[in-house]
């Protein structure tokens, strides 16, 4: 099994060969490591790819981020949201681009989760709520990458979910030996995402294990739970995971406070459902 | 407010949200009252959905495609793996009360009405 796991990992991380992952992403990731690079340089690179720029601006102007005025240039977006958020947006829109039609539900689930995370972070007065939002957006990216790289695994996982009434995560562990949370952490390392986002991606199913930025893991854990209860989109199963009480405590969330935050979520979730790209009836 | 298919649009409805192009340009302002002329314009512009004032049939506002009542019934299903977990029963109760409250429903039954 160990050998098989290593083989899967290799196949999954051949992610740089993904057809739609823009070369821009590699260039931008390199610039991130270079301390002498400026936002102008990064903006110029992104702006070269017009389709990508349009997608990024569409996300930036969506209700997830709630900017009152339109953001028209990549450079402005970079200044407002920061490079890490923009890189997260590039990754999510590019990766989700290759998903099959059968995964539209996962995109809705992810966008919904991003919105809930953004609402939670803002209501709780956390610094940089955009970074929590993009972590919510990326929290299931491992599911998509596995499906794209090894399609037959996704089919197996789905049939285990159906036949054995397991959660998607349980089915992944049964079939692959690891879950999308592990894949998320590998991908975060591969793309050199900041530790904050990595903690949210890698530990949203077991937030108490997060070591460095537990509030990211706790917040995405709660955001994922809420969007599953609201059934906006689908994470691949139709059951809620166990909500960690420790996460509510860590975030200072009483039920009363959660109820008020739910009101904000409810009022905005309509518009968020509209962020779904190229949906034809 | 509800989201409806343009094919279900009727004269007399008012827009709860502006109609926009994908790039955000406003085509019709919020508050516009629909007339048959405006509805055929929406068709010509190939707009698929609009937001109008008022609640859908049954008097329940909806988010996504589920009504509050349907949501209450779904809770039992979604939480089925945690039926003997006191903490999760508490969490479920929180959401049940929340949905009841949002739906303005008066169903005090402790056992739900599944």
Image (spheres, coloured by chain):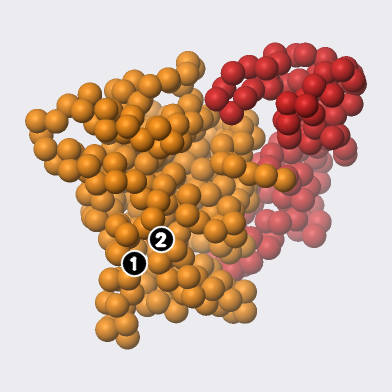
In the displayed structure, A40 sits above or below A216; it is: above
Quarter the C terminus of chain B occupies: bottom right
* Picture residue at 27% right of the left edge, 77% below the top: A6
Q: Earlier in the sequence, mark 1 or mark 2?
A: 1
Say if mark 1 contacts mark 2, CB within 8 Å.
Answer: yes
Left or right: residue A47 versus residue A157 is left
Quarter the N terminus of chain B occupies: top right
Identify the secondary structure beneath mark 1: helix
In the displayed structure, B20 sits above or below A105; it is: above
Residue A266 visible in the picture? no
Dividing the picture into quadrants, the one containing residue B102 is top right
Q: Colour of chain A?
A: orange
Dividing the picture into quadrants, the one containing residue A74 is top left
**A164 or A46: nearer the viewer:** A46
Left or right: residue A70 versus residue A30 is right
Q: Which mark is residue A145?
A: 2
**Chain hosting mark 2:** A
How many other residues sit within 10 Å of disc 2, few (<14), some (14-19) or many (≥20)? many
Q: Where residue B38 sits: x, y (%)?
A: 83, 18
Q: Where residue A75 sits: x, y (%)?
A: 31, 23
Q: Colour of chain B?
A: red
Name the residue tied to disc 1: A12
**A20 or B96: nearer the viewer:** A20
How many other residues sit within 10 Å of disc 1, few (<14), some (14-19) or many (≥20)? many
Residue B36 visible in the picture? yes
Identify the secondary structure beneath mark 2: helix
Q: Where residue A45 sits: x, y (%)?
A: 27, 33
């Amino acid at each position: 099994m160990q050998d098989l796991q290593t083989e899967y990992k290799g196949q999954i991380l051949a992610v740089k060969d993904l057809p739609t992952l823009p070369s821009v992403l590699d260039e931008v990731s390199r610039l991130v490591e270079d301390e002498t690079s400026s936002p102008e340089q990064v903006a110029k690179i992104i702006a070269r790819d017009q389709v990508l720029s349009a997608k990024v601006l569409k996300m930036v102007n969506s209700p997830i981020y709630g900017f009152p005025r339109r953001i028209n240039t990549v450079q402005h977006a970079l200044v407002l949201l920061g490079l890490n958020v923009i890189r997260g947006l590039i990754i999510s829109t590019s990766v989700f681009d290759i998903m099959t039609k059968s995964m539209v539900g996962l995109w809705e689930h992810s966008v919904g989760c991003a919105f809930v995370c953004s609402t939670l972070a803002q209501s709780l007065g956390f610094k940089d709520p955009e970074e929590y939002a993009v972590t919510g957006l990326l929290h299931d990216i491992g599911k998509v990458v596995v499906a794209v790289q090894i399609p037959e695994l996704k089919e197996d996982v789905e049939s285990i979910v159906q036949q054995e009434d397991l959660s998607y995560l349980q089915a992944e562990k049964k079939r692959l030996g690891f879950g999308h949370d592990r894949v998320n952490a590998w991908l975060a390392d591969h793309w050199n995402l900041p530790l904050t986002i990595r903690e949210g991606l890698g530990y949203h199913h077991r937030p108490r294990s997060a070591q460095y930025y537990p509030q990211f893991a706790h917040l995405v854990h709660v955001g994922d739970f809420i969007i599953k209860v609201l059934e906006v989109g689908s994470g691949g199963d139709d059951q809620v995971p166990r909500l960690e009480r420790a996460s509510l405590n860590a975030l200072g969330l009483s039920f009363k406070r959660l109820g008020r935050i739910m009101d904000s979520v409810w009022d905005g979730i309509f518009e968020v459902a509209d962020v779904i790209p190229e949906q034809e009836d | 407010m509800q989201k409806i298919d343009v094919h279900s649009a009727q004269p007399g409805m008012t827009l709860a949200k502006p109609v926009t192009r994908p790039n955000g340009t406003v085509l019709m302002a919020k508050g516009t009252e629909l007339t048959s002329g405006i509805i055929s314009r929406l068709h010509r512009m190939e707009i698929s959905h609009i937001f109008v004032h008022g609640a859908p049939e049954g008097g329940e506002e909806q988010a996504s495609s589920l009504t509050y009542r349907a949501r209450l019934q779904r809770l039992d299903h979604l939480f089925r793996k945690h039926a003997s977990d006191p903490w999760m029963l508490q969490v479920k109760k929180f959401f049940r009360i929340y949905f009841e409250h949002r739906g303005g429903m008066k169903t005090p039954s402790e056992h739900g009405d599944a």
